[in-house]
Amino acid sequence: MAHDTAPATTENGSKKSGLRTIVAASAAGTTFEWYDFFIFGTLTSIITKNFFSGLSDTAGMILALLTFALGFMSRPLGALIFGHIGDRKGRKGTFLYTILIMGIATVLIGFLPTFEQAGIIAPLLLMALRIVQGIAMGGEYGGAAIYVAEHAPADKRGAFTSWIQTSAGLGLIAALAVILLTRTLTGEEAFADWGWRIPFIISIGLLAVSVYVRTKTAESPSFKALHDKGAVVKDPFRQSFGKWSNLKKVLIALFAFMTAQGVVWYTTFFYTQVFLEKTVRLEPATINYLVMAMTVLSAPLYIFFGSLSDKIGRKKVMVTGIAVAVISFFPGFHLMVKFANPALDQAISKTPVLIFADPRDCSVQFDPVGKAQFTSPCDLAKGIVSNLGVPYQSRASEPGAVAATVQVGTEMVAIRSGAGLDTAEVRDLKLQATTQIKAALIAAGYPEKADPKRANLWGVFAVLMVFALGATALYGPMASMLVEMFPTNVRYTALSLPYNIGTGWFGGLLPAISFSMVAGSGNIYFGLWYPVIIGSLAVVVALIFLKDHTGRDLDTIPDDE
């Protein structure tokens, strides 16, 4: 009897050990890739100063955010490239390629020349490397999620794959920790000048560890069985997107939860940083501490919600997460202003900034190449106030008015047209108006920075944790939901595309879109309509069309379901 039992126990222990290694290898590599990706998003303000210094503050910030988004926009291309390789050649080798490409591109960013050193070449090189990063990320997530799911037991698939979901949070923690340590050791001035390069360059060590760990794992049993039967598809694209049964699942995955995942996750972990720095005016180091604490405490929630989905179903948990986020964003952002900078909140309520101008003179002030001249009175007034990070309300001026007027309380600052003036004269005009408006704002109680003595950081942190609750409930079970939707022979390709469109296009573009909406409207909360509308639509689509296949056998998913 003892003779019969021992081998079974040993085999069972060996399987558990092997599965832990697989999860660790997948999560470690994905964490590293997220670390690489998140460094850029966290250093957006410094990237703006170093690579887009030839533009105005608002245009430079928007373009830096769009460069950040370039990495996301190129992810669907990576999904198609590496999804095809993964379905044709196997899971393991594919995401070895992705991690190598991602790591090399990240290290190279640390050695790029700045705009002052190389002119327009600098931002072009930066954009090119962001695209390379995005292509690598496009193949990474699908491979890691599938690899773990195809090894995991069916009744614990949500729990095991949720470790892949935590890798995003762990990557963000690592990025924030390295940036904070580097900032502390170099000092803020040196960090802004050259210290920002260090987090990019030292990632070469993390790359070496991640590659080593991944080389120690074996191929997925589901793909191996498919290969042994000679059932590997020759054309994953046609099978995934040319066959309605699979294409329908791709569309449902995209619109029922992937678009929501993109906007919810990036509002929670990225747009909050932009908002707290540019609008609320908290110190960057304080923001790093807050977001890092939120990310650390929310990391176990991915595991919790992934495990919960094994018991009550993926759909219930994920839809609840989307709803929590949608309901909490508007009141949460209002509360962050009240908690972090009560003086700003009071000034906005007591003395709103009004801009009186002819609406016909107003244009959308976005100039990616820095060549356009916004010289109308309306454009100059809105550009100056936006660059100061102050919300405003637009009013139509009296008929025949030749100047725009910025009103702060009883103070009125007239801004005439810059048409016909040379560059130096327009700059002087802006400088004079900016000085006058700044003085009026200070007199009206608008703070230049958030006062740390008055800031209720615990209140800000509580709001961030509510956002994180929604984000983790949506994201924790998501890998299992995606894997359980698609048959093995096209799983890598079919899963990766909706994931990377939702995360890459809808999520990656969110900081730039929301910031542009705020700059154009003057309403600091206007950008929240983007994630709220996308999230609300996803809830409706999920309730109507999304089927829950929690715990199904991955090797018997029909093509014509």
Image (spheres, grey):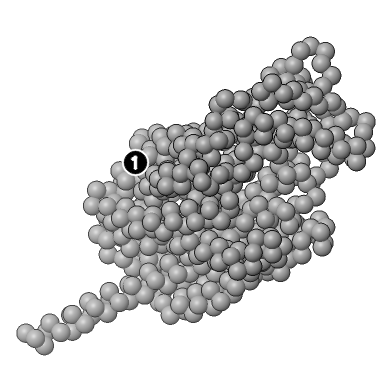
Residue 338, placed above or below residue 165: above
Q: Nearer the viewer, residue 317 or 190?
A: 190
Q: Nearer the viewer, residue 52 or 317?
A: 52
Residue type highlighted by circle 1: Thr
Left or right: 519, with 36 as reference point: right
The residue at the far bottom in this view is 3
Quadrant assignment, res 81: bottom right
Q: Quadrant of the N terminus?
A: bottom left
Left or right: 295, with 197 as reference point: left
Q: Nearer the viewer, residue 203 or 243?
A: 203
- Residue sitting at 72 percent across and 47 percent down? 60
* Mark 1 neighbour density, 10 Å: few (under 14) some (14–19) many (20 or more): some
Q: Is residue 449 visible?
A: yes
Could you tell me residue 323's position as x and y percent?
Answer: 38, 38
Judging by the rendered image, the residue that carries numbered circle 1 is: 320
Residue 436, placed above or below residue 456: above
